[in-house]
Amino acid sequence: MERHVLAGLRRQADIVFGPAKVVVFVDDTDALLTAAGWAVIRVWEHEDAEEAADVIADLVRARRSRH
């Protein structure tokens, strides 16, 4: 059962160890998309937005040039 850890946080944790304040996110979405030929990039809110945009743009250009 997924559980909200913080009020206002959109994400729900898959496993929660409350007293230890440890949360676990089980995510098999990347594997499914990769198997279907998609490239998956995860950008976290604490990452530099310009750096993330550069990584995304580089990957898009590289994949477009292959086709």
Image (cartoon, grey):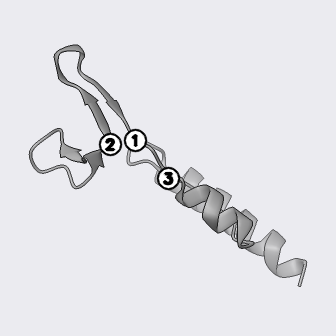
Residue 20 sits in which quadrant? top left
Q: Which mark sits nearer the N-terminus, 3 or 1?
A: 1
Quick one: SS at disc 1?
loop
The answer to whether the residues at label 1 and label 2 have Cβ atoms under 8 Å apart is: yes
Residue at the image point whose x is 66% and y is 57% from the top: 55
Residue 7 sits in which quadrant? top left
Q: Which mark is residue 25?
A: 1
Structural distance between the alpha carbons of marks 3 and 1: 15 Å
Mark 1 residue type = Phe
**Is 20 displayed left or right of 52 in the figure?**
left
Q: Is residue 54 visible?
A: no
Camera-nearest label, 3 or 1: 1
Mark 3 residue type = Val
Label 2 CA crowd tier, 10 Å (few <14, some 14–19, many 20+): some
Q: Position of residue 38 (x, y in %)?
A: 69, 71
The answer to whether the residues at label 2 and label 3 have Cβ atoms under 8 Å apart is: no
Structural distance between the alpha carbons of marks 2 and 3: 20 Å
Mark 2 residue type = Asp
Quick one: SS at disc 3?
loop
Query: Residue beneath label 3, please?
Result: 43
In terms of depth relative to the viewer, which is nearer, 64 or 20? 20
Q: Is residue 46 visible?
A: yes
Residue at the image point whose x is 53% and y is 56% from the top: 50
In terms of depth relative to the viewer, which is nearer, 2 or 65? 2
Residue furthest right as drawn: 66
Q: Is residue 65 above or below residue 20?
A: below
Query: Residue beneath label 2, please?
Result: 14
Residue 6 sits in which quadrant? top left
Q: Which mark sits nearer the N-terminus, 2 or 3?
A: 2
Q: Position of residue 61 (x, y in %)?
A: 78, 74
Q: Position of residue 10 (x, y in %)?
A: 22, 55
The answer to whether the residues at label 3 and label 1 have Cβ atoms under 8 Å apart is: no
